[in-house]
Amino acid sequence: MQLPIYETLGMRKLGLNILFIENIANVSYNIAKKLRELGWNVMLLTRENPSAGILDQSNISNEPWVKTFPCYSLFDKTFRYLSRILEFDVDIIHCHYALEQGLYALFSKVLRKTKKVIIHCHGTDLRDVSRSWKYGWIVNINLKLADKVFVSTPDLLRNGVEFLPNPIDIFLFKPAKPTIDLRMGHDYAISSFQTRLET
């Protein structure tokens, strides 16, 4: 089985090596997990995030394809981050967030450690950071030089960008009967609104 998100890059065969960088909202973890179930060779490289606890699945995963590293100092965020990315020879780097990690992925491409770079924007990078004088240039270089750009919400769409909704782990999030009456309060709100209209 193939996934159209990689077919658009001309990558149609199984056996590709894909590196996901960062795990924003567990998107990388969930996509990588599904791709691995389908036979793809996928690794996830992300910064340690112990404060997130179980909210970050990569933080609690014992899977050998999930690689984390400490990233607290300026040295960690620059040289260590870049060197960890350059450890991998892959066909695609799918980078989540368009800041320094995107630049490192593009540098990996220049060094021929990867063939294609995908930048996947999740919101703040496009809504806020891209407009800042301090870091906006980084976001804009990533968007310009990436082979493909995805966004996680439709409001971020622009020319040349595709919408890829965030996956949801249906084993973690299951429908349940509500423990409260979801209509509670609506009758009061409607009658209050009606009373204000009548006065």
Image (cartoon, grey):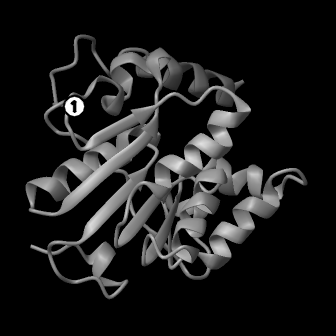
In this view, the residue in front, 185 or 149, is 149
**Residue beneath the point at 54% across and 49% down:** 83
Q: Is residue 152 visible?
A: no
- Seen at 46% across and 32% down, the residue is 69
* Left or right: 8 in relation to 147: left
Give the percent coordinates (x, y) of residue 93: 42, 64
Residue 74 appears left or right of 166: right
Tell me: residue 176, above or below residue 77: above
Q: Total label count? A: 1
The residue under label 1 is which amino acid type?
A: Phe
Asked whether residue 24 appears in the rendered view, the answer is yes
Residue at the extreme right of the image, as rendered? 133
The one nearer the camera, 109 or 139, is 109
Which SS class for mark 1? loop
Q: Residue furthest top?
A: 179
Task: Point out residue 37 in the picture as x, y percentages from the top left corner.
Answer: 9, 54
What residue lies at 52% left-to-right and 73% top-to-bottom? 109
| Quadrant housing the C terminus | top right
Q: Residue 148: percent from the left, percent from the top?
A: 49, 76
Q: Quadrant of residue 65?
A: top left
Seen from the viewer's position, the closer of residues 193 and 112 is 112
Q: Quadrant of the N terminus?
A: bottom left
Label 1: which residue? 173
Q: In the current view of this chain or complex, which residue is farthest to the bottom? A: 10
Q: Nearer the viewer, residue 63 or 130?
A: 63
Indicate left or right for 193 with 86 as reference. Answer: right
Residue drawn 65% across the image and 67% down it: 142
Image quarter for residue 192? top right
Crowd tier of the residue under label 1, counting other residues whose Cα lies within 10 Å: few below 14, some 14–19, many 20 or above: few
Q: Is residue 22 above or below residue 146?
A: above
195 relative to 162, above or below: above
The answer to whether residue 154 is left or right of residue 99 is: left
